[in-house]
Amino acid sequence: SSLASLVKIQLDLRASRDQYDGQVYYGVVNNVSDEQSKLGTRYSVPQIAFFKAIIEAIAQDVTAQGTISNIDALNIKLENQVLNSLGSQSQDGSLNVPAAFRNFTLSQKEKTLDQLVQDKWLCFTEDGNVGVGVRSILDLRSWFRNAEVPSCEVCNEAGLKAKLCPNEGCTVRIHQYCLKRRVCQRGVIVCPSCDTQWQYQPPKAEPIELEDEASGPTQSQPPSRSTQSQPPLRSRRKRQRLSQNDDAETAGCSSQAASQADSDMRRVTRSSARLR
């Protein structure tokens, strides 16, 4: 089979979820980290050190925000990477930083950051911060475990972007999409470690105003005298339902007490082939 062929050439087909939106991604990953595979990268040594420093900064965040600010990323000093990994020192005891690291300018960092985002190693979140890309989630799974990044209590994947247990003395963390699935299934969720009940407030789905409805009144505008151009209530509900389905992973669970007339509008479906 195709999967067996991948195993023979030391490749692996993996599936993983985007930490920020829950969408499922599939990728082929190299299982061998040798000198030949290292030559396949188009990134320079300083660029790789810059990327590693960003990943480490995100992974070591105890608040599990899963991101760092753009400014913090650009202010990363590559000398620290030399100190942590190379540890090279001159005879007088001073740190011997390679010239390529010392001469790595701010503009080169910006260019590298954009390139890493384009190649899916990193990502830009909606609030403009720098996050871990889906390619890193697929490829660096073993690195996250070796670095002892706390895993999600539900899916056992690295909990880079996750919700923390309300009990400050507990280290349990759960991905937002995993927490939502548990709440939808059980109604409530209790921490498996300290038995603290988790409070989950699903985000509200907001209707999207379509451009072709510009002639009709909006919520912030009073209705015009002519009501012939205004879509009927049932049509607006249908559009609202479509908007909710497009954002199924971020919308909240459907209310069990919703009326039958509004049930179709509020129902949120989930695709098993997507992460978010």
Image (cartoon, helix red, strand yellow):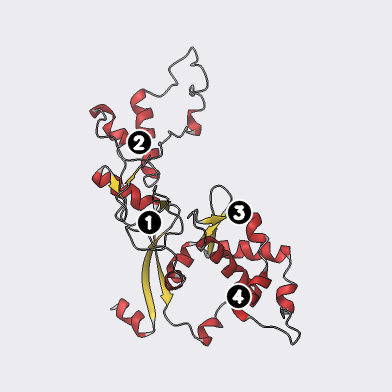
Residue 107 percent coordinates (x, y) = 72, 63
Q: Mark 2 points at which residue?
A: 241
Foreground disc of the pair 2, 3: 3
Q: Mark 4 points at which residue?
A: 84
Q: Is residue 266 above or below residue 145?
A: above
Cα gap from disc 2 to disc 3, whole angstroms? 34 Å
Q: Which amino acid does label 4 sit on?
A: Asn
Foreground disc of the pair 2, 1: 1
Q: In this view, does 272 lie to the left or right of 146?
A: left
Specify which label sits upstream in the sequence, 2 or 1: 1
Q: Which amino acid does label 2 sit on?
A: Arg
Q: Which amino acid does label 1 sit on?
A: Val
Find numbered disc 4 in the image and state the secondary structure of the residue it sits on: helix
123 and 264: which is toward the camera: 123
Cα gap from disc 4 to disc 1, whole angstroms? 28 Å
Specify which label sits upstream in the sequence, 2 or 4: 4
Q: Mark 1 points at which residue?
A: 172
Residue 191 percent coordinates (x, y) = 31, 51
Number of numbered callouts drawn: 4
